[in-house]
Amino acid sequence: MIFGTNPARKSAGRAFLLFSLICLPVLGAAQEISPEIAHASGASASGVAAASYVVGEADTLRINVWKQPEISQPNVVVRPDGMITVPLVGDVKVSGATPTQIEAMLVSKLKQYVSEPRVTVTVAEVSSKSVYLIGEVARPGAYSLTGPLDILQIIAKAGGVTPYAHRKSMFVLRRVEGGKQKLPVNYSQIIRGKHPEQNLSLQPGDTVVVP
């Protein structure tokens, strides 16, 4: 007996081939996203909100100039003088500005070299705003301060306190004019909902000590 081709299977094969020819080019094109779409989320790859984060010295920026790879900078570190160097433009003061403001500055400066420049600036790495956690926690170290962060939150980020921590004797060392200020923190009371004022909002340069 000779088996013939199943008409239903042959029809399904033709339909799949037609779907592939139509959809694959569209899917491929979808991978190329304009800077405007990428920027619409309002956040960089590091999760820093472009509209509100203020760039500081030692931060790493990613600068993309649409269709201008020779001008784009995949990783440029803000120097201690608050400047970065961009091809054609030269030195640009970025410290104290948001990524959105930096984009506007670069667009203005590039107009004399590039027709209708489109620039996207994201924060690749935050180094200018850090707080420090030392002592009896699971993961002591430096933590980036990209938004509001309090005592409970940084200890949670660090994996919690160890069994040897003196929970009632924690403190924060904060830089103030003329020296450092020691701010007591009773962690045991905070986690019980008492004395919420001791759950301090941290500032850049703060050191949380867990004895």
Image (tube, grey):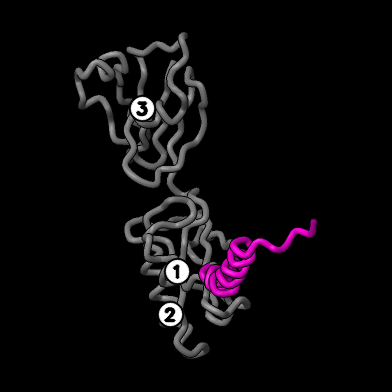
Q: Nearer the viewer, residue 47 or 11?
A: 11
Secondary structure mostly seen in the magenta stretch: helix
Asked whether the beta carbons under mark 1 and mark 2 sit within 8 Å of each other, the answer is no
Q: What element carries label 2?
A: helix
Which residue lies at the image location 24% right of the left edge and 15% below the top edge?
192
From the viewer's perspective, is residue 153 above or below residue 184? below
Where the N terminus falls, by quadrant? bottom right
Residue that label 2 marks: 107
Of pointers 2 and 3, the one earlier in the residue sequence: 2
Give coordinates of residue 74: x percent, y percent: 59, 64
**Which mark's residue is nearer the viewer, 2 or 3?**
2
Which contiguous range is marked in magenta?
Answer: 1-30
Give coordinates of residue 12: x percent, y percent: 58, 63
Mark 1 Cα-neighbour bin, 10 Å: few <14, some 14–19, many ≥20: some
Which residue lies at the image location 43% right of the left edge and 21% below the top edge?
160
Q: Which of 49 and 1 is in front in this view?
A: 1
